[in-house]
Amino acid sequence: MKLVAASGVLRRALPLGSAEAASRADAPPTAAPGDPAWAHFTRRHALALLYMREHVPALRDLERGPWACLLAIAPHWQGGRRDAFPGQERLARLSGYDARSIREFTKQLEACGVLDVSRHKLPDGTARLHYEPGPALLAGVELFGARYSDERPKPVEVAPNGPARGGLRAKPLAPADHPPPQRQRSEVVSGGGPAAISGELPDPRDQKNTSFCSAVEPEAGASNHEPGPEPSELDRDVAREALGVLRERRFGRRVGLFDTKVVAMVAACASAIDGDRETKLRAQRDAIEHAFAVSRSTPTPSFVWGSIDHFLNHETHGRRARVEAERAGARQARAAEAERSRARERSRLEREACAPPPEVLQFMAEFPRGKA
C-alpha cells in the first residue's frame, strides 16, 4: 500500500516520463537468473556468515564493530537481491552501536572489499545509501555455495513391500519381539538427549564427522576411564559443583541438572584426588582454569575430564599456575608494603628536617612563660 501511494505521488508531482524513470531507478534490483549461489546465501545468510567468518580471510580479520554491522545488513538481502538500503538508525538499533559508528563501520567494510556502498538520490532531494556485496563477500558466497549445496535429492517413492520406482525395495519391518530401546527418563522428560539435559554443547574435536554443519553429536559421557572403585557421594557432589563452574564459565549461568553419565565421568576424576571437599573442588577449579588456558575454544566436559590422566594433567598445570600467581601476588604485596614503609620514613625525616634546632627547643622550654 505504501509503495502504491508513493508511486501515485511521484506521477502527480513529476511528468509522466520522469515519474516512470524515477520509479524504475528506485525499484530494487532482482536476483540474476544465473546466480544460484547468491540466492542460496540470502536464504541461509546466518549459517553462511558463520562459515565465512571462519574460512574467508577478509571476514576473519574483521573487528567486532564491522562484523556486527555486516550481521545487521545481511538480513536485508532478501529474495536473491543484491541491493539493500536499511537506514543507519535501524542498523544502529540492530547492532547495538550508534549511527556515527555505523558510518565508520561501513567505510571499513567497503575498504576491505566486503561491501560496495553507493549513494542514490531520491526525487524529493534526499539521498539514500545502498549496500551491495563486495568482491570479498561474493568470493565467500561462492565458497559457501560450493561447500554446502542447496539442492536436495528428491525422495525415492518406496512401496511397502514391493519394488520402488528407482529399483529399491523397502526394508522389512522389525519383528514385534524386539522392541526399540527405551530412552532414559531424563531424555523423555526433556524431549532430547543428555546434551539437552545438561545444556552442554559437544566439542567439535570429539566428533567423528568434521563437517561444519554436521548434526552428529558425540555420545554424552563417553570417556576412556578404566574400571575402578565406585565414586562416593562426595565425589558426585564435587562433580556436580565442578560442572556448574564450567557451565558458568562457558555460558554465564549455572544449571543444577546434568546427565548421569557426565556426572559419573567427572566423579571418577574427583575420586582420584585425596582430601576433603575443599581440596577436591580446588583441584577441579585448577583443571578448569588450565583447560580454558590451552583450549582453542570454550572447553567441554569431555575436554577436561575425558580421562583421568587427562584430568590430572590439567590439574597439575593449573595448580602450578595458581601457586605461581599466588607467589607473584605475595611478592607484589611485600613490595607495596616496603614502599609504604619507605614513604613513611621519608615523611618522618622531612618533618624532622623542618623542625627547629634542639637549642631553640631547649630555650623555648626554659623560657618563663606569663612574665613580661
Image (tube, rainbow, N blue to C red):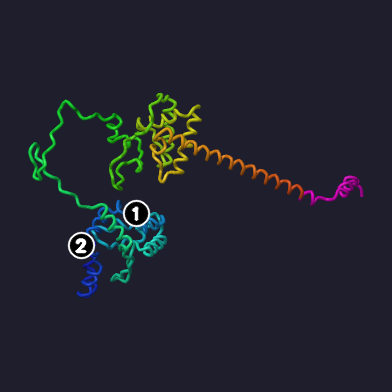
Q: Earlier in the sequence, mark 2 or mark 1?
A: 2
Q: Is residue 352 magenta?
A: yes
Characterize the magenta stretch by its predominant secondary structure. Answer: helix
Mark 2 vs mark 1: in front: 1
Q: Are marks 2 and 1 in contact (CB under 8 Å)?
A: no
Q: Is residue 253 above or below residue 45?
A: above
Instruction: Tell me where residue 88 sits by quadrant.
Output: bottom left
* Residue assigned mark 2: 34
Which residues make up the magenta segment? 350-372
Q: Position of residue 269 (x, y in %)?
A: 43, 31
Tag 1: Cα neighbours inside 10 Å, few (<14), some, or many (≥20)?
some
Where disc 2 sits, the SS reads loop
Q: Is residue 327 above or below residue 140?
A: above
Q: Is residue 28 magenta?
A: no
**Residue 302: % across, % down:** 38, 37
Residue 61, image quadrant: bottom left
Mark linked to residue 55: 1
- Residue 49, how many percent across, how many down? 32, 54
Left or right relative to 318: residue 96? left
Instruction: Find numbered disc 1 in the image and state the secondary structure of the residue it sits on.
Output: helix
Q: Nearer the viewer, residue 63 or 308?
A: 308
Residue at 48%, 30% in the rendered image: 280
